Image (cartoon, rainbow, N blue to C red):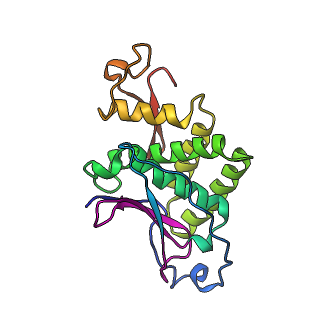
Amino acid sequence: MRFILTTIILISFSHTAFGQSAKAEFDVIAPPVCANNLGETVQFETVESTRVTSAAGMARRNEAGVPVVYRFGYKFSPPALQQFIDFHECAHHQTGDIDRPHPPQNSPEHMMNESIADCIAALRMRDEIDDGKGLLAEAVLELTKAMQAAGFPSLTTDSRVSNIENCMQKDTSSEDFINGVLIHRGLKRDRDPQSPTHNNCPFCISAVGNLCAGFFCGTV
């Protein structure tokens, strides 16, 4: 069974000063509305774990085949980061990642999937939440802290943040962006001959450090 784990991986900081210090706790937000590319409702489930010191998420189908986002350690992160991770994991369902072969960890294909999910999360926060841009800025700050604490190289962190910030400026909606991804992957038919993704127009790729930010032809 395929699953996606957000790049804030489930990791123990028990041997670091970060992990030893007392962690503030926050209220856990209500999950957003989420349906996958097949129209199935995605469920959100909270999982208690003693190894997680920052919010993390996992998108997969459960044993019954139901699309689920598992939420770990949400109480240890502010609402802004909780919201971003919910949207990010939802995006893996929306773009069909869960039902596609999962590429090798840290491969270009895997990093592209993560960049796309980040982009959709940024667009949804920007457009669907009051003061979405301000909340997204807070989420990026908390995401940066969490990735640094987990030991990610600064280039990886900076590349991810740059992709999120670039996506926030895109002149498109999350719905249109998701449709473009699905059309490109052959998971949805494009009925608009004027669309930049018509006739399987390929991705226009913009390299950002170690990551690739996904842009569709005509939108760069």
Q: Residue 185, image x and y in percent?
A: 31, 34
Give the residue drawn at x 67%, y 66%. Answer: 78
In the image, the segment drawn in magenta is 46-73
Q: Quadrant of residue 55?
A: bottom right
Question: What is the residue that sits farthest to the top in this orientation?
Answer: 194
Instruction: Check residue 65 for magenta coloring.
Output: yes
Whether residue 214 is visible: yes
Q: Residue 197, image x and y in percent?
A: 39, 23
Give the residue drawn at x 40%, y 50%. Answer: 93
- From the viewer's perspective, is residue 149 above or below residue 173? below
Q: Quadrant of residue 2?
A: bottom left
- In depth, the one of 207 and 19 nearer the eye is 19
Q: Residue 198, image x and y in percent?
A: 37, 19
Q: Quadrant of residue 216?
A: top left
Residue 22 is left or right of residue 121, and the answer is right
Give the residue drawn at x 44%, y 23%. Answer: 217
Q: Quadrant of the N terminus?
A: bottom left
- From the viewer's perspective, is residue 194 above or below residue 95? above
Residue 173 is left or right of residue 109, and the answer is right
Instruction: Check residue 211 for magenta coloring.
Output: no
- In depth, the one of 128 and 198 nearer the eye is 128
- In depth, the one of 158 and 166 nearer the eye is 166
